[in-house]
Amino acid sequence: MGSVPPSVVNVRRAPRRLAGAVLAVLAVVSISAASCSESPRDVTVGSVSRADVTEVVDASATVTAKGVATLTAPADGTLAGLSVAAGQSVTAGQIVAVISSPTAEGRLAAARQAVDSLGGGSVTAGNSRELVALQRRSDADALAAFATAREQAAGVGDAALRATLLAQLDASQSTYQEAAAAARALVTSVQRGFASIGQAMNALTAAQRAQAQAAYDAARSTVDALTLRAPIAGVVQLGGASSGSSGPSLTDLLGAAGGAAAGAAAGAAGTGGSGSAAGAPGVDTAVLPGARVTAGTPVLTVVDTSELGLMAEVDETDVLLVTPGVVAEVELDAAPGARYEARVGSVDLLPATSARGGVSYRARLTMGAGRFTDGRPAPPPRPGMSAVAHLNVRAARAAVAVPAAAVFNRDGRDSVWVVRGGRAVRTPVTVGVSGQDLVQVVSGVAAGDRIVVHGTDRVRAGQQLP
């Protein structure tokens, strides 16, 4: 009969479902191994001890940026100027490019002329019949003008600008409808002899002026947007954020903490168009000065890497253990041997289909500095890099612990073989923090108890053991 001296045991538990999700334990365990000729072959008896147990869930992850904003052409035209270069740092609000769009500028000129034509006088009508016809024509023209403006606004690739234009049109159309309703009421009053034709014509002019002003405001916003400004501070990348249909989406690259900067970047990101007509499908390519662009063409992307994070996919069988504040160590495929610090900021309530086809939940982590095992600082990662997050979800200090191989399930209960009076006794136990090689036992055994630590499937109740 021999004994194994105290040793440091590095413990990991295999995943319940997600491949690569394991549980790690660092513990000091004293196990007395014993066997004799009366024991079945490959059966080992040891002593229950106390150890520090840490449960770790591993999750595949992607490095994220604090903010990502893709600037797109707001209208058809030509890239007249590009004032930044790839890799250059920019500040929020800095002019980065200018689009020349004769179409947008022509719409603005026409809208300004329409406003000016209504500024010095009113429409005229000789009688109530002409007044009714004029009122109906005004309503039809306004309806067509608002429909055209909405169609133009919907074609704008910049999501933030598109939302602003549509909101402006909603407000302007509401103003016009109020003015038009007042004009129609006065026309009715004229027909009944309660109001003059002049009053009704003034009301119709006011309604037309509201519609013309709305068209001018929309055209002015589009022309102003031809000067592209960086919505966030960061580093410039020419073209769009996606480098291919199989790469991570823009949303996947946004800040892990979901902060205000990330939200602003998402709102400023364009959604449509390819970088070049000659580009391959699904690939954003750089647009050079002088090139033709259409509404929605990605011109450049600003990436804020001042705070890096992670987007981790946690399997549904583990997600209830992952809560805000959980710390983690991160390994990158691009930096073998380096470990980065991270902390969980939030966990999504709704699931997503994982890359392996199962159900997973996204956890967002903030990411800290990294170091190699020899103490050297690790290089800062780049958004989109693949990683594995080792999430320290639970810990038990100086806990009663047994080797994982000692625990077996029978009749729906976790049990161990305890050696009492030299014979094996099946004893139900309650397991707490678990690992591949070591688990915490909350109840059922105590430190110092002798148990079967290996070969439990070869033991029967009452069997004589040393």
Image: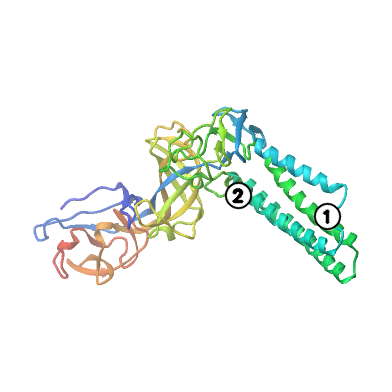
User: How dense is the environment of label 1, judged by Cα within 10 Å: few (below 14), some, or many (20 and up)?
Assistant: many
Of the image marks 2 and 1, the number of the one nearer the N terminus: 2
**In the visual, does 99 lie left or right of 139?**
left
- Viewer-closest of 135 and 356: 135
Q: Is residue 416 left or right of residue 186?
A: left
Which residue lies under the disc numbered 2?
Answer: 154
Residue 418 picture quarter: bottom left
Where is residue 241? Give x, y as percent: 51, 39
| Residue 123 coordinates in the image, percent (x, y) | 84, 53
Residue 45 appears in the picture as rendered: yes
Which amino acid type corresponds to the residue marked 1 in the rendered image? Thr
Callout 2–callout 1 Cβ contact below 8 Å: no
**x 82%, y 45%: residue:** 117
Q: CA distance from mark 2 to mark 1?
A: 28 Å
Q: Residue shown at 83%/68% (left/top)?
A: 188
Residue 84 vertical position relative to residue 17 in the rendered view, above or below = above
Outermost residue toward the left? 37
Residue 398 coordinates in the image, percent (x, y): 39, 56
Label 2: element kind: helix
Residue lying at 91% horizontally and 64% vertically, measured from the top left = 196
Question: Does any portion of residue 226 appear in the rendered image?
Answer: no
Position of the C terminus, as image quadrant, is: bottom left
Query: x, y (%) of residue 246?
Result: 40, 43
**Residue to which mark 1 is pinned:** 205
Left or right of 75 in this view: 329: left
- The answer to which image quadrant residue 45 occupies is bottom left
Along the viewing direction, whichever of 45 and 114 lies nearer the viewer: 114
Q: Residues within 10 Å of mark 2 (few under 14, many from 20)?
A: some
- Residue at the spot x=15%, y=70% of the render? 462
Mark count = 2
Hey, what amino acid is under mark 2? Ala
Q: Quadrant of residue 305?
A: top right
